Image: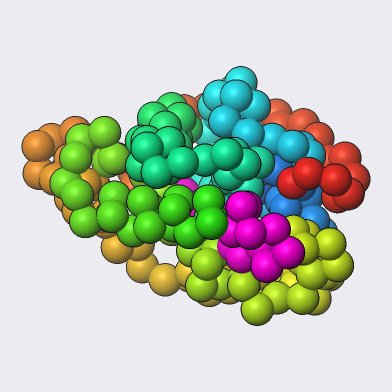
Amino acid sequence: MRWLVSLGFGMLLAGRAWACPDVLLGDSLAVGMAPDARAAGFEVIAQNGAGLPWLRQQTPRCVGRLVLVFGTNDLRGLGTEAAEAYPRQIAAIMERWPAERIIWATPGCFARDPALDAASRLLDRALLDSQTRAEAALAHLPALHRGRVSRCEYPTADGVHPTAAGYRAWWEGLQGMMAQRPVPSAAATASANSGMPSAAMAASQASARAIRASVPGTSGSP
């Protein structure tokens, strides 16, 4: 009997050790959201000023749910052509992450910075267009939590970063989306029909790895 109890306890510990954590990944907007994410049991990997080069350098790891709060630092000088290419670049990076589900919280409104706001509109339009195109290159594009819709009314102290109440409301909206049943995009559906799995929808088979969160301050660039 004692060995059965020991075996059961060992299996329980092993199950916990190999469970894939939920992760919040992104720039200083993710840093600001970190307290709410941690309270919900999420690990946090975030850095001020993070852009595509930083995201590519992160080591893919086993993840349950992954929330990507990202894109603001790549908006400066973003033109139409670059905005249209951006979804494919995110999809290519996220393809390497073995996650059960990935949600991308995209940039919002920037009323105090017309150039940044114009680029945010371009990216939002490109993301909406990408959802209607059944392209293999977009099969791993995460489900979108559109900043142009979800956070433009949130109060902000500096024109970029929400206040604590704004971050809380934003996180609550993300949690609501995570609770919904995933709806595959046209590209993911086409990928599934062709036999190519989507990393954003498929359950992970990779082993869990330790995650170290980098959480600097929230001032300055996102």
Q: Position of residue 5 (x, y in %)?
A: 65, 44
Left or right: 222, with 71 as reference point: right
Residue 12 as seen in the image, left or right of residue 96: right
Q: Based on the displayed image, in which of its 4 quarters is residue 8 positioned?
A: top right
Question: Could you tell me how many numbered marks the image carries?
Answer: 0
Q: Give percent across and percent down for residue 22.
A: 60, 48
Give above or below for 136 relative to 113: above
Residue 110 in percent (x, y) is at: 66, 62
State the extent of the magenta-drawn residues as a range.
100-117
Quarter of the image for the N terminus: give it.
Answer: top right
Residue appearing at x 72%, y 53% in the figure: 29
Instruction: Estimate the x, y position of residue 45 in percent, counting from the top left.
Output: 71, 39
Q: Is residue 101 covered in magenta?
A: yes
Q: Is residue 144 visible?
A: yes
**Could you say which is closer to the camera, residue 9 or residue 157?**
157
Q: On the rendered structure, is 173 left or right of 112? A: left
Residue 66 within the magenta-colored segment of the rendering: no
Check the image and report above or below for 79 versus 184.
above
Vertical placement of residue 212 versus 160, above or below: above
- In this view, the residue in front, 174 or 83, is 83
- Please tell me which residue is depicted at 19% across the width and 49% down the height of the picture: 133
**What residue do we see at 37% from left, 37% from top?**
81
Quick check: can you spot residue 3?
A: no
Q: Nearer the viewer, residue 137 or 17?
A: 137
Q: Is residue 77 left or right of residue 123?
A: right
Residue furthest to the left in view is: 194
